């Protein structure tokens, strides 16, 4: 039970970026509350990579260790629940949680990430983060030189499969319907021995999330070891939008170089506002957001 009601900073979201911001602020002697539901978007991913000192670690182990370290600072408190409403007040913000508690803070930091809108292809969600992956920098080394499919179409699909060709030459581009690739793009892919498959995908055959075959609507199939896909996403938490924070054209929270949103007193960090989705990037943006908020509080009080 949280006895304290008033904080200098309320962080909504306690995964990698939120914990990183909490450490930065806690070490700055700020009174901080972290509200988190305990459901990070990468909870199904078996291993995290490309994060120095944590390469190959289980994501949940990284966050658990981080929480223990942040909890060391008595300036930071945790509340495991959902933030369901947030309103602007004369002195800052008021946050209400699903548990019925209400807290106030001078500044709000949203570290709430995004929610992937997975297609209704049977087997896709079970393989997501395991053998259906989105980032070659996070997972490409582990499936290098393997039989790989890339789901995409048009310019985005072409650029995506071009990038993945750095990790494997055994590639197929699945447009999941009629191709909208240009003639020049098709010629380039043919020259690179990258087959373009236009047939619609029916289902994925897998074993505990490890892809074995892709079945198409015409009942043809291909065997692969990895699939790259970039499903659309939306903000995991709608509170920033309800508060008036602007989004970018791609649906991310718009922030400036100091992680400030377009609404005074509201900040964002992590996957909710950065294009490059990785644990390392989330930690970096959270640490900087914490320092930025602390500097703002110093400036406001030093008068």
Image (cartoon, helix red, strand yellow):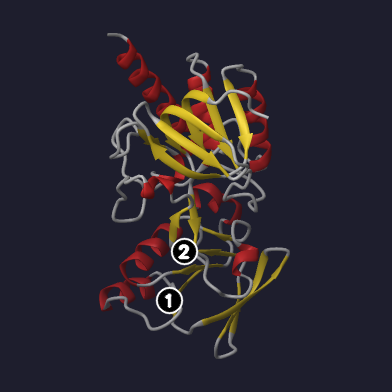
Location of residue 293 by image quarter: top left
**In the shown orientation, is residue 115 left or right of residue 130?**
left
Q: Quadrant of the N terminus?
A: top right
**In the shown orientation, is residue 72 left or right of residue 137?**
right
Q: Quadrant of the C terminus?
A: top left
Q: Residue at x 40, y 69 (%)?
A: 192
For label 1, the crowd category at 10 Å Cα-Cα, with few meaning under 14, some 14 to 19 and many 20 or more, is many
Location of residue 255 by image quarter: top left
Q: Nearer the viewer, mark 2 or mark 1?
A: 2
For label 2, the crowd category at 10 Å Cα-Cα, with few meaning under 14, some 14 to 19 and many 20 or more, is few
**In the shown orientation, is residue 134 left or right of residue 187?**
right
N-terminal of the pair, mark 2 or mark 1, is 1
Nearer to me, 129 or 13: 13
Q: Residue at x 52, y 29 (%)?
A: 20
Task: Give the tally of numbered discs.
Answer: 2
Q: Residue at x 55, y 36 (%)?
A: 16
Location of residue 68 by image quarter: top right
Residue 59, image x, y percentages: 63, 42
Q: Which residue is mark 2?
A: 231
- Per the rendering, the mark at residue 90 is none
Q: The residue tagged with tag 1: helix, strand or loop?
A: loop
- Per the rendering, the mark at residue 175 is 1
């Amino acid at each position: 039970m949280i006895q304290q009601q008033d904080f200098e900073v309320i962080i909504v979201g306690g995964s990698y970026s939120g914990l990183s911001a909490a450490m930065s602020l806690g070490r700055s002697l700020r009174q901080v509350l972290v509200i988190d539901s305990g459901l990070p978007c990468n909870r199904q991913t078996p291993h995290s990579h490309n994060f120095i000192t944590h390469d190959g670690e289980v994501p949940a182990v990284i966050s658990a260790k981080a929480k223990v370290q942040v909890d060391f600072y008595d300036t930071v408190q945790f509340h495991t629940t959902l933030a369901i409403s947030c309103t602007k007040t004369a002195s800052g913000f008021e946050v209400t949680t699903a548990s019925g508690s209400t807290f106030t803070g001078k500044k709000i930091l949203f570290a709430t990430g995004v929610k992937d809108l997975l297609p209704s292809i049977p087997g896709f969600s079970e393989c997501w983060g395991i053998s259906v992956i989105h980032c070659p920098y996070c997972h490409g080394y582990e499936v290098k030189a393997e039989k790989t499919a890339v789901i995409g179409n048009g310019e985005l699909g072409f650029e995506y499969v071009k990038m993945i060709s750095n990790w494997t030459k055994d590639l197929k581009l699945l447009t999941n319907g009629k191709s909208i690739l240009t003639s020049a793009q098709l010629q380039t892919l043919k020259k690179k021995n990258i087959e373009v498959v236009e047939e619609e995908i029916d289902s994925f055959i897998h074993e505990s999330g490890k892809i074995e075959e892709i079945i198409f609507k015409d009942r043809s199939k291909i065997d692969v070891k990895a699939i790259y896909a970039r499903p659309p996403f939306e903000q995991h938490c709608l509170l920033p939008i309800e508060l008036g924070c602007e989004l970018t054209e791609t649906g991310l929270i718009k922030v400036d170089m100091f992680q400030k949103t377009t609404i005074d007193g509201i900040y964002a960090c992590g996957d909710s506002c950065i294009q490059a989705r990785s644990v390392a990037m989330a930690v970096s943006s959270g640490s900087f957001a914490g320092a930025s908020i602390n500097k703002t509080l110093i400036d406001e009080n030093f008068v």
